[in-house]
Amino acid sequence: MGNSQGEEQLAQPAGTEAWGQGAIFKSRLWDVNQKSLYLQNNELIAGYLQAPNSALEEKIFWIRNRAFGQKNFPVILSIQGGKSCLASSPGSPPELQLESINITDLCKDKEASARFTFFMSNKDGIWRFESAIHPGWFLCTSSKANEPIGLINDPGSSHLVDFYFQPES
């Protein structure tokens, strides 16, 4: 697998056989300001991790949510080896939550998995993640370092919704 970040490579990173079985993929995710993700007090934080702290970076484990069909590239995102999933709260305004649930348990039921599903889009190597249950709300980081990641519908200069997303072997 090459290092290009094209959507075609991401769409079938392990071949159609693995894809059809609901394979879990591992990627590195960081915002366009180069902030990495790490876990602190059960919150996912975006900050600048320098050696030796770079080992704290959380890898993103993801699976295609086939319950949502093929359109809009629906995925479920998790950390900690797929044991803690990112979810949009049902309330208004929505908040990003981490829930202790295995990623493979979520992609069987569309209704149950909706809060955990994000539509992934790519433009020129930059990725965005839109909440499936809250259209127009995107995964975001603060423009400040060491702040929790969240959801926002109007990014402005205080929040970033653009990410780099690189598959890992």
Image (cartoon, grey):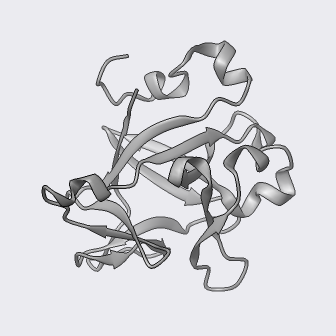
List x then y, in percent, for residue 148: 40, 76
Q: Is residue 66 above or below residue 10?
A: below
Q: Is residue 44 left or right of residue 48?
A: right
Quadrant of residue 143 within the rendered picture: bottom left
Front-most of residues 73 and 136:
73
Front-most of residues 43 and 35:
43
Quadrant of residue 166 within the rendered picture: top left
Q: Is residue 168 above or below residue 107?
A: above
Question: On the rendered image, what quadrant is the C terminus found in?
Answer: top left
Q: Residue at x 65, y 67 (%)?
A: 99
Q: Is residue 69 left or right of residue 86?
A: right
Res 73 visible = no
Q: Residue at x 80, y 42 (%)?
A: 67
List x then y, in percent, for residue 43: 47, 75
Q: Is residue 90 left or right of residue 49?
A: right
Q: Residue at x 45, y 29 (%)?
A: 7
List x then y, in percent, for residue 87: 63, 66
Q: Is residue 31 above or below residue 81?
A: below
